[in-house]
Image: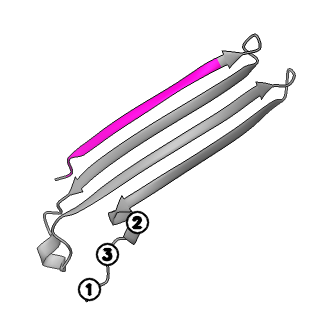
Amino acid sequence: MFPRRVIVLSSEWDFNNKLCTLTLGLSYSSNDIEPIDAALFGRDRKEDKRSRSFSIGWTQVLNKISLRRILYSIQTLLGVLAKGMERPRT
């Protein structure tokens, strides 16, 4: 059972007679993970996974065969993905 929630916002703006484009994006996702066979393998019965990301980019057409693209992206992972497949038992 894997209920999932996702929110994505993105936009782009053209400048300089459509030769330049600025892009901006934000996203958030959340998953609740409940494996049906977790007890058989000694794993956690319920985990969650969360992800947040931000991106910004600039694209410019230089000539008929060339363009310049600058992109920056950052992502934060929390939960199952941040600590690997299985956390150490104490």
- Residue under circle 1? 89
Q: Point out the frontmost of discs 3 and 1.
A: 1
Task: Check residue 86 in the rendering and tell me which mark sits there, or answer none.
Answer: 3
Q: Residues within 10 Å of mark 2 (few under 14, many from 20)?
A: few
- Residue under circle 2? 82
Quadrant of the rendered structure where residue 89 is? bottom left
Report x, y in % for residue 83: 38, 71
Q: Is 31 drawn above or below residue 61 in the view shown?
A: below
Q: Are marks 2 and 1 in contact (CB under 8 Å)?
A: no
Would residue 43 be found to the left or right of residue 8 on screen? left
Circle 3 SS class: loop
- Residue at point 40%, 65% (across, down): 82
Circle 1 SS class: loop
- Front-lying residue, 13 or 84: 13
Task: Check residue 75 in the rendering and tell me which mark sits there, or answer none.
Answer: none
The C terminus lies in quadrant: bottom left
Report x, y in % for residue 68: 79, 33
**For the stretch drawn in magenta, what is the main secondary structure?**
strand
* Magenta highlight on residue 10: yes
User: Which region shows up in magenta?
Assistant: 2-13
Q: Point out the frontmost of discs 2 and 3.
A: 2
Q: Amino acid at mark 2?
A: Ala
